[in-house]
């Protein structure tokens, strides 16, 4: 790894390089140098991303575009190009690496410590979308095709289920049945996207609370990180994925499902930050936000279940049944949203112009 780091013109000599953060996809390291500078050093996932040069073109284009809209260096990610001026380094083993400035004096939360933290994350993701309204979307590569195409996620699920490579399906029939019972409804957003009923925007597509940085002192939103999935999408994806993760009363991998609920006060607080920050959502877009929450949660649970059945190749796991535990929290959240559905819709409608 040292020889890889040497490819990047860091300030000072690296003193340490340790695994960092709670991302499920890339291998992230914190590098500290003798000058006191800190960097985020990442090995990109080749399982998740099949065209990393294209992905890095997206990241470079988006960070460049955003940096021109702000004076504050902490308001957007900053890539450190290699000594040869490339946005990534491809090592002789075929692995892709990149370096970002560490966003200093910031915090990255796994769970909101107060409703205000969640509100701030909503401001960050809403503003991100507004700032990209005039980004030339045709420049973006689709880094993961069909990322939030839920029917396509079901297609893959059916394939893996039929193959059942580890013989795990029999023991998780309840979870399989849960997913199958909702397959028809799961295609609703995709159908609205295809008919043009909902507009395409440049969306982040992975709006977990741990993909946003807050200022450690003021706890105000600083910037959005993890730009690997910035692609054209629906606003409901970004809203929904944030609710899935941050409005849950428990962790994504909580084993005790009694602790998992979708908090309506947090849901409302997120809307208060997100809708105004986005700037210009249509009535139809606002009406579909609750559906985004339910379907992004269902889709994510389905992805965890698919990966569990497939032998845990996609999401990093720290214990054997980690993806199954994650599936169960997501499906518990879906059940809870179904129970709270009328309230979720009423609250969203109170934000209609
Ligand atoms: P993954 O795709 O695996 O989720 P991320 O890019 O989200 O990878 O990085 C994982 C974690 O590393 C983040 O949740 C955050 O805690 C931390 N992180 C990433 N980039 C930065 C940065 N520039 N400054 C500070 N922390 C960062
Ligand atoms: C992954 O990369 P990370 O950990 O921020 C995944 C998201 C899932 C999320 C579930 C590229 O996000 O789609 O919703 O895990 N990212 C990718 O926690 O697949
Ligand atoms: Mg991340």
Image (spheres, rainbow, N blue to C red):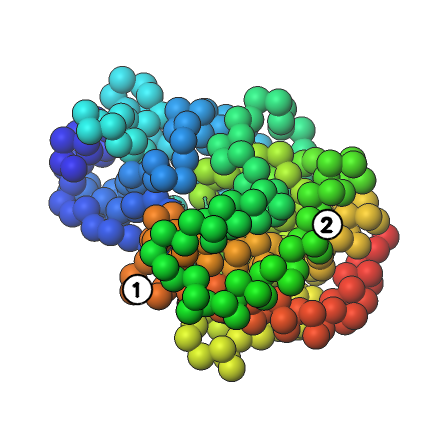
Who is closer to the viewer here, 171 or 129? 171
Percent coordinates x, y for residue 291 in the rendering: 71, 57
Which image quarter holds the N terminus? top left
Crowd rating for badge 2 (residues with CA inside 10 Å; few <14, some 14–19, many 20+):
some
Identify the secondary structure beneath mark 1.
loop
Percent coordinates x, y for residue 136 in the rendering: 63, 24
What residue would you read off at disc 1?
Answer: 320
Q: Quadrant of residue 5?
A: top left
Percent coordinates x, y for residue 115 in the rendering: 58, 69
Instruction: Residue at 57%, 65% (x, y): give it.
Output: 177
**Left or right placement of residue 258 versus residue 30 in this view:** right
Inter-mark Cα distance, 1 to 2: 33 Å
**Left or right placement of residue 313 versus residue 75 in this view:** left
Q: Is mark 2 within 8 Å of ligand 2?
A: no
Who is closer to the viewer here, 287 or 144? 144
Instruction: Residue at 42%, 49% (x, y): give it.
Output: 163
Residue 188's disc is 2
**Left or right placement of residue 169 versus residue 272 in this view:** left
Identify the secondary structure beneath mark 2.
helix
Instruction: Residue at 57%, 49% (x, y): give it.
Output: 154
Q: Is residue 186 visible?
A: yes
Instruction: Check the image and report above or below for 51 versus 298.
Output: above
């Amino acid at each position: 790894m040292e020889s890889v780091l040497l490819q990047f013109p860091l300030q000072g000599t690296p003193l340490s390089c340790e695994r960092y953060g709670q991302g499920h996809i890339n291998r992230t390291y914190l590098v500290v140098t003798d000058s006191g500078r800190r960097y985020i050093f990442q090995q990109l996932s080749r399982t998740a991303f099949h065209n990393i040069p294209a992905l890095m073109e997206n990241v470079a284009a988006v960070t460049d575009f955003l940096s021109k809209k702000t004076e504050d260096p902490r308001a957007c990610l900053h890539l450190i190009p290699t000594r040869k001026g490339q946005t990534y380094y491809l090592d002789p083993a075929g692995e892709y690496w990149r370096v970002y400035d560490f966003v200093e004096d910031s915090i990255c939360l796994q769970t909101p410590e107060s409703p205000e933290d969640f509100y701030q994350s909503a401001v960050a993701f809403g503003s991100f979308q507004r700032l990209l309204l005039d980004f030339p979307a045709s420049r973006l590569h689709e880094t993961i095709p069909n990322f939030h195409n839920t029917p396509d996620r079901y297609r893959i699920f059916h394939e893996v289920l039929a193959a059942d490579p580890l013989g795990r399906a029999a023991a998780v029939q309840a979870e399989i049945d849960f997913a199958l019972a909702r397959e028809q409804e799961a295609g609703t957003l995709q159908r609205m996207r295809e008919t043009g009923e909902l507009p395409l925007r440049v969306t982040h597509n992975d709006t977990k609370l741990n993909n946003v940085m807050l200022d450690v002192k003021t706890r105000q939103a600083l910037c959005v990180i993890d730009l690997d999935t910035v692609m054209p999408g629906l606003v409901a994806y970004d809203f929904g994925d944030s609710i899935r993760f941050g409005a849950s009363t428990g962790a994504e991998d909580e084993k005790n499902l009694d602790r998992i609920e979708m908090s309506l006060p947090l849901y409302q607080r997120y809307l208060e930050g997100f809708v105004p920050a986005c700037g210009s959502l249509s009535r139809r877009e606002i009406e579909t936000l609750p559906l985004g929450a339910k379907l992004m949660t269902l889709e994510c649970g389905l992805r965890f279940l698919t990966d569990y059945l497939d032998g845990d190749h996609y999401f990093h796991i720290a214990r054997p049944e980690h993806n199954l535990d994650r599936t169960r929290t997501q499906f518990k959240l879906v059940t809870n949203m179904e129970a709270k559905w009328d309230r979720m819709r009423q609250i969203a409608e109170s934000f209609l112009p």
